[in-house]
Amino acid sequence: EIVLTQSPGTLSLSPGERATLSCRASQSVSSSYLAWYQQKPGQAPRLLIYGASSRATGIPDRFSGSGSGTDFTLTISSLQPEDFATYYCQQSNSFPFSFGPGTKVDIK
Amino acid sequence: QITLKESGPTLVKSTQTLTLTCNFSGFSLTTVGAGVGWIRQPPGKALEWLALIFWDDDKRYNPSLKSRLTITKDTSKNQVVLIMTTMDPVDTATYYCACRQGTGWFDPWGQGSLVTVSS
């Protein structure tokens, strides 16, 4: 079973700043099988990134994903007010699928 | 456009069985590669993957809950049903269904269905 760890748990930043979120897997995950989601309070998660680095339809280019093996990163180049939310990574490399515990990005 | 919507009871009692239905449109579960998954989220906590059913009726479950879960599909109705037995207050959560895409990411998701388990 692959366990995903996300850091930091909370990231306090100001609008316009760069956000760097980490997702670490307990075993190697093929890049094709790593996704990132954004969730706002009271809403369902929304797909941001799939295949570690491909943006989903309609996702602004300030969101980017990178990484391989056991270390993956989601970067938001310049935080917009609507980006303050919780972010989850997910692996589908092997069953059971798993999600990380999330990183909350809040306003400093 | 793909849409999914969960339905089921909002309140169940401890030890009872929960039955949730996911009604979807915009794709067919007879299409090779298609799949629908269930994911839950306790209040204020992280997402937990529960189960996944594929177009060929292959079914996968989270081992931690496998003995309590059953996932089925009705392709004629565009429905996927999740059954969870022996409900407990710790199972209180929002339950989401979602369309499996590509190599296993989920997009889109339903709006979610909050299920509260009373003791």
Image: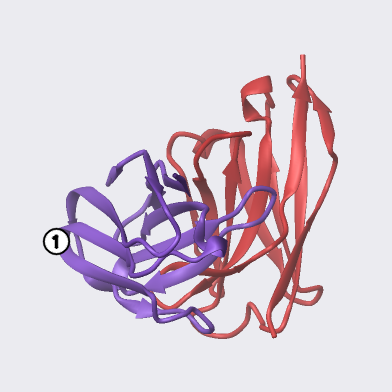
Chain colours: A purple, B red
Asked whether residue B22 is in view, the answer is yes
Count residues near mark 1 (Cα–Cα under 10 Å), then give few for <14, some for 14-19, many for 20+.
few
Q: Quadrant of the C terminus of chain A?
A: top left
Picture layout, residue B53 above or below residue B70? below
Residue B98: which quarter of the image?
bottom right
Q: Position of residue A32 (x, y in %)?
A: 28, 73
Image-based side of A105 in relation to B12, left or right: left
Q: Nearer the viewer, residue A33 or B83?
A: A33
The amino acid sitting under disc 1 is: Gly
User: Which residue bears the numbered disc 1?
Assistant: A69
Q: Position of residue A93 (x, y in %)?
A: 29, 62
Asked whether residue A1 is in view, the answer is no
Q: Nearer the viewer, residue A108 or A99?
A: A108
Q: Position of residue B48 (x, y in %)?
A: 50, 43
Instruction: Say which residue appears at 56% left-offset and 75% top-offset.
Output: B55
SS at mark 1 in the image = strand
Q: Nearer the viewer, residue B54 or B104?
A: B104
Picture layout, residue A28 above or below residue B4? above
Residue B11: which quarter of the image?
top right
Instruction: Say which residue appears at 75% left-offset and 19% top-offset.
Output: B14
